[in-house]
């Protein structure tokens, strides 16, 4: 029996993929995670010869989807686009997180690094980050901050921002920063921290304001947006990333097939242009391996652990 079982598994791996693959996106369509997922999986589909179908599974800051992915069969036909929130900050933000970002997944590879910006509705009177912070501290009515749920990048990033600036907004959750951005553009919320791929089109259209980018350098796509340090807030050092994961026990051969297809997408000039034009950072070969992603997840969990006490921002 063992020999038959072995040969069945071997055939399944050698034929992989024999049918379409589901790629779970833990947030609503239109946000940064959905954007990155659709860009890279479109090209991966052509490499693998099978459709990769995006399934937006929302809720609980992306952790609902992550848990769903851990329960999928480890056959290579379900993957998830996780990120600094679902596979990093969520561990600190959820005392009883129902999954372990390290032991419950097989890392496939990094799709794109992602700066995080402090964004505000266009008609907010503050002309700079300093004015925004001063106004937030002195205003009678608290500001309204949008986010994509506990455990999301937008939540963790702005939790850090609020901690280091000592401002205490009202929090408005959305199923992703796609809908949150629509609310910001409409002026229904006052600010949020979002990943650059979502901010770039709105900033280029002049329909939202960016006060700062949380990184060491300005983005070449947004040369007029100062770094948080230039804007007087050096403590706001935040960057995000979006990466592909499979359920634990997905075979190394299948992980390697998916990693190779991801690498081909990231080497494709048209795909690179799409990601770079949106401010994404494309990992080099060393940064694309499953091992590099596993190390990043471990370090990100540690980096955000101080949030557990919610008043000591990560270094
Ligand atoms: C987040 O973590 O805030 C999400 O990436 C937002 C999104 O992709 O919709």
Image: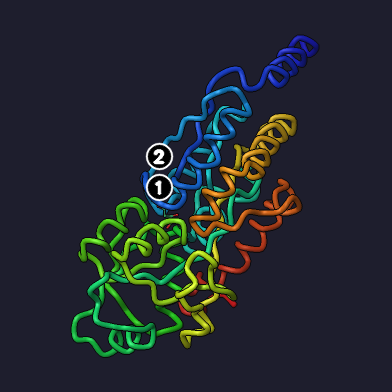
Q: Where's residue 185, x and y in %?
A: 26, 62
| Among the 4 quarters of the image, the one containing residue 1 | top right
Give whichever of discs 2 and 1 has the lower sequence position: 1
The residue closer to the viewer here, 237 or 252, is 237
Q: CA distance from mark 2 to mark 1?
A: 6 Å
Left or right of 170 in this view: 201: right
Q: Which residue is mark 2?
A: 56
Q: Residue at x 53, y 23 (%)?
A: 20
Point out the quarter of the image occupied by ligand 1: bottom left
Residue 177 sits above or below residue 168 on the image: above
Q: Is mark 1 within 8 Å of ligand 1?
A: yes
The residue closer to the viewer here, 255 or 128, is 128
Q: Which residue is mark 1?
A: 27
Left or right of 9 in this view: 34: left
Q: Are marks 2 and 1 in contact (CB under 8 Å)?
A: yes
The residue closer to the viewer here, 219 or 111, is 219
Q: Is mark 2 within 8 Å of ligand 1?
A: no
């Amino acid at each position: 029996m063992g020999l038959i079982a072995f040969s069945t598994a071997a055939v399944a791996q050698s034929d992989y993929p024999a049918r379409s693959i589901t790629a779970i996106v833990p947030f609503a369509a239109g946000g940064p995670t959905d954007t990155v997922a659709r860009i890279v999986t479109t090209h991966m589909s052509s490499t693998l010869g099978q459709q990769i179908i995006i399934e937006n599974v929302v809720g609980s800051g992306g952790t609902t989807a992550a848990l769903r992915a851990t329960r999928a069969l480890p056959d290579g036909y379900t993957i998830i686009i996780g990120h600094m929130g679902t596979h990093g900050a969520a561990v600190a933000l959820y005392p009883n997180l129902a999954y372990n970002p390290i032991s419950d997944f097989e890392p496939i590879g990094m799709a794109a690094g992602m700066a995080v910006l402090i964004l505000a509705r266009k008609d907010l009177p503050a002309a700079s980050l300093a004015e925004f912070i001063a106004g937030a501290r002195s205003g009678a009515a608290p500001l309204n901050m949008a986010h994509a749920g506990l455990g999301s990048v937008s939540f963790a990033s702005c939790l850090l921002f609020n901690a280091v600036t000592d401002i205490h907004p009202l929090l408005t959750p959305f199923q992703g920063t796609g809908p949150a951005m629509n609310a910001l553009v409409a002026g229904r919320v006052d600010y949020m921290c979002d990943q650059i791929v979502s901010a770039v089109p709105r900033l280029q259209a002049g329909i939202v304001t960016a006060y700062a980018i949380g990184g060491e350098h300005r983005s070449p796509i947004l040369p007029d947006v100062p770094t948080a340090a230039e804007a007087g807030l050096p403590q706001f050092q935040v960057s995000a990333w979006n990466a592909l994961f499979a359920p634990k026990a997905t075979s190394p051969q299948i992980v390697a097939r998916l990693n190779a297809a991801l690498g081909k997408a990231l080497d494709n000039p048209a795909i690179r242009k799409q990601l770079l034009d949106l401010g994404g950072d494309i990992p080099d070969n060393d940064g694309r391996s499953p091992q590099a992603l596993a190390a990043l997840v471990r370090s990100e969990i540690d980096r955000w652990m101080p949030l557990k006490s919610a008043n000591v921002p990560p270094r």
